[in-house]
Amino acid sequence: YGYTMVYRETGEVRFLNFARKVADAYLSRLPEDLIPYWDFDAVNIPHELRDASAAAIMAAALYELSMYSNKAKYKETADKVMHSLSSSDYRSKIGENHNFLLMHSVGSYPHGNEIDVPLIYADYYFLEALKRKRDCDIEAKSKSVQK
């Protein structure tokens, strides 16, 4: 996320290249539904907690990265992450979960803080990812109309 934003602000290609490298490494370690475990090296995978907040942050980053890299895989993957986050496995029912949007985030498992709970920043990045998805879709429509 951060390297993509630094690229956006500086235009320095080294940050874009590093963002791609980090994204590719991250994506290579995800489970089938693309929602990461609270730690990629947790000892009881696949029986570890998932982290919806990490997934929401990465989805937002992948949408923006897709706009700079011309690699459809980043947008396609972000779409799949958002599909998983929007499922009943991670998305709260209206009026439940203390009115948070997402369930099942992990703040700091080793410190015993924010374990399998809703987190405000998970909801923030989920909404940001939805906005970026819309922006990507609008840009794609605009390009197809120009052709």
Image (cartoon, helix red, strand yellow):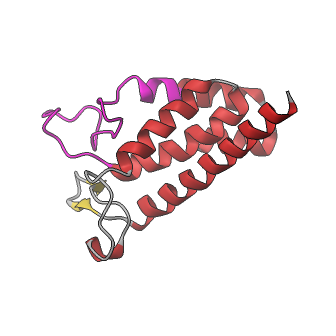
On screen, residue 45 versus residue 5, left or right, reads left
Residue at 76%, 27% in the rendered image: 13
Confirm whether the magenta stretch covers residue 30: yes
Residue 63 in picture, x, y percent from top left:
60, 40
Residue 105 in picture, x, y percent from top left:
30, 55
Residue 7 in picture, x, y percent from top left:
73, 38
On screen, residue 101 versus residue 47, left or right, reads right
Quadrant location, the C terminus: top right
Residue 115, above or below 62: below
Question: Nearest the camera: 140 or 101?
Answer: 140
Question: Nearest the camera: 32 or 143?
Answer: 143
Residue at 29%, 33% in the rendered image: 40
Determine the image quadrant of residue 112: bottom left
Residue at 32%, 39% in the rendered image: 36
On screen, residue 57 versus residue 29, left or right, reads right
Residue at 22%, 51% in the rendered image: 110
Residue 28, above or below 11: above
Quadrant location, the N terminus: top right
Q: Which residues are magenta?
A: 22-51
> Which SS does the magenta portion mostly show?
loop
Residue 133, above or below 22: below
Give the tally of numbered discs: 0
Residue 93 in picture, x, y percent from top left:
29, 67
Confirm whether the magenta stretch covers residue 24: yes
